Image (cartoon, grey):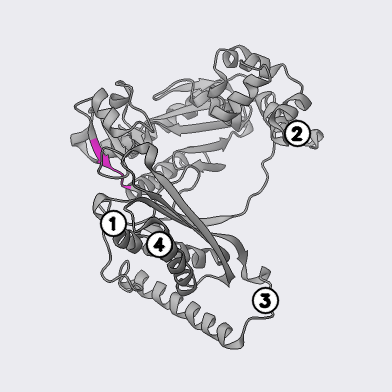
Amino acid sequence: MDNHAFQPQNKLKCLFFDLNSFFASVEQQDRPELRNKPIAVVPADTDTTCAIAASYEAKAYGIKTGTRIYEAKRLCPDLICVLARHDIYVQYHHKIFDEVERHIPIDKVCSIDEAACQLMENEQSLEQVQRLTKSIKQGLYDNVGGHIKCSIGVAQNAFLAKTATDMQKPDGFVILPPNNYKELLFKLPLSDLCGIGRNMERRLNCAGITTIEQLWNLSPKHARKVWGSVAGEAFWYRLHGYEVPEKATQKRVVGHSRVLDPQHRPSDQAYIIMKQLAVKACVRLRRYELYARRLSMRVKIKGQSREQRIYWAQDTSFSAAQDNFTILRALDKMWQQMQYETQKADLLKVSVNLYDLYKAEDITLDLFEQPNTVCQKQQDEKLSQAIDCINKRYGKQVVNIGVGANLKTTSGYVGTKIAFNRVPDLEEFIE
């Protein structure tokens, strides 16, 4: 690692904002009857699922992301479960981020509810930062809605600014002043630092590090040794206020998953959902102008208890493709194998991923592929593109492949949802 490339910062350089209980807050903003009530946003209408978001009224009962709904209802008998509406959350995401950009340019969108903004030289004083923060919060209140709250952190770099947003919620504002923030950090547990999850905390504890102060006092090389990679050294520098450039990444996988509604858990019904997920992934491949060489399929099989539930997974390879038909043929073979091995058991969740991705210019042709096969693939690709055009013009899945009428889920769409660090394109909800 070239440590000389890192720049120590002694000014307030980054403003980070984090929307509070985003999914639940959007529901309360969009549906007045839910305001000031304990709500949990859920992926499916069943008590065996878990909350993917909770309002602050629900959090007061101890309900949080990941809490099983049967447990949440025990903690709060008046809990209201709301089916997730990812399309609405993406619409609000764009509306909110457009409002923020009226006050300060967004440098990096980190997730559906987080973003980092670089402060210009004339914005780095305490007075200007306070003015800017007040302006952003007032703009959200006036132009998006009073139930959309955010916590804002300001520090030398994005890592420390994000840490600051977690120090005061909801509707918080925390500044970590350069050269004078150690004591504020040292009061926090290790797990409050972004990047230190349960496994990493366990590794640090095994190395004798149980506090942020101990982590701070390590040498960069020691941090690298504890992490077992250069990531530990980069973490140390960010903790100490250095600006560490992030490596550019490229898309490695395109996929979708779905927790099945009870009526879609029989194997034959689940296969219709799985095929729709695969086609959605293919549509995204074509939109990104990518080709895949591998397909993976994963299902969660229903058992009598949580402990008895098991996963079945398999992957397969093929010549680089982006058309629906190549992918569905590969999927069909794996699905038949899964049904045979599981005796057509009911399923709880299905997932499909396309990976080993390439741009067209980076594909190496298969010397042994027959000319008629190449011709068929070209026809399949053109037909898939034609289906995309028809569906985009006349409506979602006006034309579909071998699934009969478009199968509806309780959420109204199949597959598209918000991942931790991926904001779906609005087009995905109409594909």
- Badge nearest the viewer, 3 or 2: 3
Region of the chain picked out in magenta, as a range = 81-85
Residue highlighted by disc 1: 266
Amino acid carrying mark 1 in the image: Pro
Amino acid carrying mark 4 in the image: Tyr
Q: Is residue 290 above or below residue 369?
A: above
Characterize the local packing of mark 3: few (<14), some (14-19) or many (20 or more) Cα atoms within 10 angstroms.
few
- Badge nearest the viewer, 2 or 1: 1
Tell me the element at label 3: loop
Res. 365 mark: 3
Quarter the C terminus occupies = bottom left
Of the numbered discs 3 and 1, the one sitting upstream in the chain is 1
Res. 340 mark: 4
Q: Is residue 83 above or below residue 62?
A: below
Amino acid carrying mark 3 in the image: Leu
Of the numbered discs 3 and 2, the one sitting upstream in the chain is 2
- The reply to whether residue 186 is in sight is yes
Position of 19 with respect to 1 (left or right) is left
Residue highlighted by disc 2: 6
Identify which residue is drawn at 27% across, 62% down: 407
Identify which residue is drawn at 49% across, 23% down: 130
Amino acid carrying mark 2 in the image: Phe
Q: Residue 357 placed where, x, y %?
A: 60, 62
Position of 24 with respect to 286 (left or right) is left
Tell me the element at label 1: loop
Q: CA distance from mark 1 to mark 4?
A: 14 Å
Q: CA distance from mark 3 to mark 2?
A: 42 Å
Q: Is residue 82 within the magenta segment?
A: yes
Position of 177 with respect to 281 (left or right) is right
